[in-house]
Image (cartoon, helix red, strand yellow):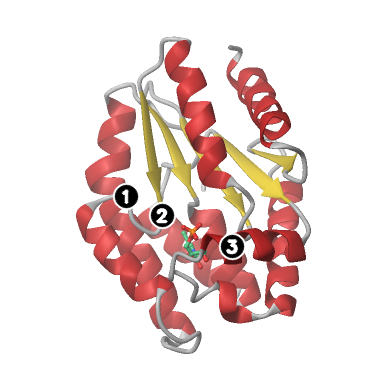
Amino acid sequence: MTSARSQTGRFITFEGGEGAGKSTQIRLLGNALEKSGHTVLQTREPGGSPGAEEIRSLLVTGDGDRWTGMTEVLLHFAARADHLERVVRPALKAGTWVLCDRFVDSSMAYQGIAQALGKDVIGELADLVVGTTMPDLTLILDLPVADGLARAGARGEGEDRYEKMGHAFHETLRQAFLDIATDAPERCKVIDATQQIDGVHRAVWDATAARFGL
Ligand code: TMP
């Protein structure tokens, strides 16, 4: 999994536990990048293409034990393959900056670590499906589990299959994202998401500006 690519667009992913404020921060960063003259695409996983959105509904609704771990991870990577082929790679090739709400680090944290499928399974699927289309920058929004679950619960969107998985699951997830950042410091930046929205946005902007020399 390397980030060597010939495309001119930039690929930025947002990661973190439930209720970390990713969608708000993606919107704010997207607006700021557009103001500075870049073409921006905001997208998400699971989802982001018509087919992947159909797969999303299988993943985010229903009982926690709806799928076996292997079926679940294959559904995530099936959605990812469609999203990458039909949306992300064409956009990057056209010079667009792609901002994506979750990507392969979520599969590593949720399925690989918290659901205990193992890092090797995720690594092999990532090699197959993601290949060299790794993010240029990954922003990991970090906050205490209880705060995130309270915010996510208040949204009440009905897409709560993962939110229902219990406190210990979410503590494991939080640590998994922090470990991913430690293992890939050249790609990942941890952002303190307990701050007010403006403060988080400033930290997101500073990390982006530093990474790309804006
Ligand atoms: P969202 O709530 O951030 O839109 O994400 C939907 C859920 O999907 C979220 O609970 C995390 C989960 N997820 C995985 O378990 N594995 C993955 O690879 C991705 C992209 C998301």
Residue occupied by mark 2: 45
Name which residue type carries label 1.
Answer: Gly
Q: Residues within 10 Å of mark 2 (few under 14, many from 20)?
A: many
**Distance (Cα) linking label 3 and label 2:** 21 Å
Name which residue type carries label 3: Ala
In this rendering, position of residue 131 left or right of residue 110 = left
Picture disc at residue 154: 3
Along the polypeptide, which appears first: circle 3 or circle 2? 2
Give the structural element (helix, strand or loop) at label 1: loop
Above or below, comparing residue 91 to residue 69 in the picture: above
Residue sitting at 66 percent across and 46 percent down?
140
| Residue under numbered circle 1 | 48
Is disc 2 in contact with disc 1, using a CB cutoff of under 8 Å? yes
Of badges 3 and 2, the one in the foreground is 3
Relative side of 188 to 106, left or right? right
**On-image quarter of the C terminus:** top right
Residue at image point 41% right, 42% down: 133
Disc 2 within 8 angstroms of ligand 1 (CB):
yes
